[in-house]
Image: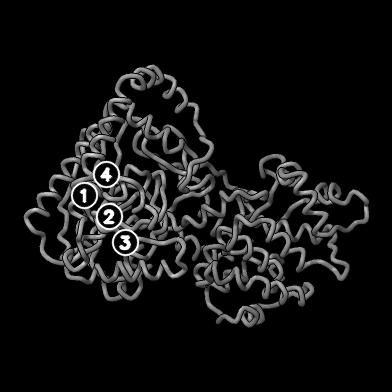
Amino acid sequence: MMAAAAAAGMRRRALGFPRSGTPLYMTSACQRPRKPRTSQADDEKFKQMWYTIAIMTVTLFPIRLFLAAFMMLLAWPFAFLAEWGRTEKELEKPMTLWKKTLDFLLKVIMRAMWFAGGFHWMSVKGRRALPTEAPIMTLAPHSSYFDAIPVTMTMASIVMKTESKDIPVWGTLIKYIRPVLVSRLDQDSRRKTVEEIRQRALSNGKWPQVMIFPEGTCTNRTCLITFKPGAFIPGVPVQPVVLRYPNKMDTITWTWQGPGALKILWLTLCQLHNKVEMEFLPIYTPSEEEKKNPILYANNVRKIMAKALGVPVTDYTFEDCQLVMSDSQLKLPVDTCLLEFAKLVRKLNLKPEKVEKELDELAEGAKKTKGKRMNLEEFADYLKLPICDALTDVFVLFDENEDGTIDIREYVIALSVVTRPSKTHETIKLAFKIYESAEATIVEDDLACILKTALGVNKLDVSKLFNAIDVNEKEKITHMDFYEFACMNPTYAEQYLYPDQTMGFTGCVKKQFATTANGFCMDFSPEDQEEERERSTLDKKLN
């Protein structure tokens, strides 16, 4: 098959990297918890512990919860006094004696709060850099709300949403550390956040250090996902900080497929001891090339942190996880090409927000082609982009017949899926608009093209689904027919397309690789990026 697709298949092999401690649940890297997935060994361990948990629930748990809440309430007046009447100009001045005293007291109270929660041993390795040496600290892996521990230990500023400062008690504590606030309502918030980080980083130590979780989401610590470039855009030295929870039972991790926030709190407070390790790595000073290329800077820092943690890296991102785990009626199969396509879209610097606005225009242009295939030069001209490696890889991905031509309609449908993964209905509606005849109908072959492209597979049998929709046996259907059927049968994909959990698909690669959950998303496989480049180069030579 095509080289880019083969490389994607190689990347997706599950390597089964272990994690520290025994996971209570097999969890993915995405942020919010859903239904837990457990292994038999984990279930047995959990059953063996239920006596202990039951006893702790009625004895130690309420005491710990009360003490932790009390310590937080105790910290509030100190944070309020420190924050009261303080201006940004005063913040840039050297710390006064009373401010240093308040800072020390708050650290002691916060340490007592974590001690009450069972975090008796907090191991700190390495030396924390001064703000003048490294104004930014990058912390990974980010796996839980318990990652607030290093924040309270260092009192470093963090990046968080604006709404957090309005939370009673906690909001006052948050404002004390002078966070960089991000507003979800402000369309320009991302740029402003980067500018604020840059301003603080270049203040020559006048502002507190900024602690950033560059992964941008929670993972289960089996690998480091792609770092977002925000912390590296200022081009100043950073201090990498790695975090470990070397506990026998992992009750800390809060990810997409796992226990909810309250359950994690309950299970963690029911443990007799909880350990956490924080290691300050040597300061990383960027080269001139890295200063000009924040992505290169981020990748190099990530490699150092991954080496210190003893885990692999993966170039998948949180957006890729959203694509796989979206709440849509069409679930992507394990061998989908769309993850590879999504990566190439990012390489082309096609922003989802901008692309979504242009989809209707792209669809109109694709409709006018009436399925006429185009070569690489025509494809580049259609997109108004120069021919480059990334664009060539996109073209190869859609060159299903390997004849040097593609159907632009398939590109537009795939682009709609990866830029708005949760909007399945809009994508299907757009696809019908592209393929429909003058009578606003499509035939079975059209439906097959639409759905196989939306799923990122090469072959797909849609005959059963088409016949179920075409109740009047007209051998053609409208979008309204499809929409009404989907509303009446929300699980139509499982029933008619992949009743055997996608095992019948033929995807991007000729050879099917066994895939297992590795901790990022259900079918993601972390591999070293240099290995990937070597394999990709080899694939291109072989093809």
Tell me which corner region of the image, top left, top right, bottom left or bottom right, holds residue 176: bottom left
Task: State which tag comes first along the sequence, 4 or 2.
Answer: 4
Q: Which secondary structure lies at badge 3? A: strand
**Of 316 and 515, which appears nearest the observer?**
316
Q: Are marks 1 and 3 in contact (CB under 8 Å)?
A: no
Q: Residues within 10 Å of mark 4 (few under 14, many from 20)?
A: some
Quote the CA–CA distance across marks 1 and 3: 17 Å
Q: Which residue is mark 4?
A: 149
Q: Which residue is mark 2?
A: 175
Residue type at the position of mark 4: Ile
Quote the CA–CA distance across marks 1 and 2: 8 Å
Task: State which tag comes first along the sequence, 1 or 2.
Answer: 1
Task: State which tag comes first along the sequence, 1 or 3.
Answer: 1
Residue type at the position of mark 1: Ala
Q: Is residue 197 left or right of residue 206?
A: right
- Comparing marks 1 and 3, which lies closer to the viewer? 1
- Comparing marks 4 and 3, which lies closer to the viewer? 3
Tell me which corner region of the image, top left, top right, bottom left or bottom right, holds residue 427: bottom right
- Comparing marks 4 and 2, which lies closer to the viewer? 2
Q: Which residue is mark 1?
A: 79
Instruction: Let me know if residue 47 appears in the view.
Output: yes
- Point 41% across, 41% down: residue: 254
**Of 524 and 356, which appears nearest the observer?**
356
Quote the CA–CA distance across marks 1 and 4: 17 Å
Q: Which secondary structure lies at badge 2? A: helix
Residue type at the position of mark 2: Lys
Q: Position of residue 431 (x, y in %)?
A: 73, 64
363 lies above or below 476: below
Q: Position of residue 268 (x, y in %)?
A: 34, 32
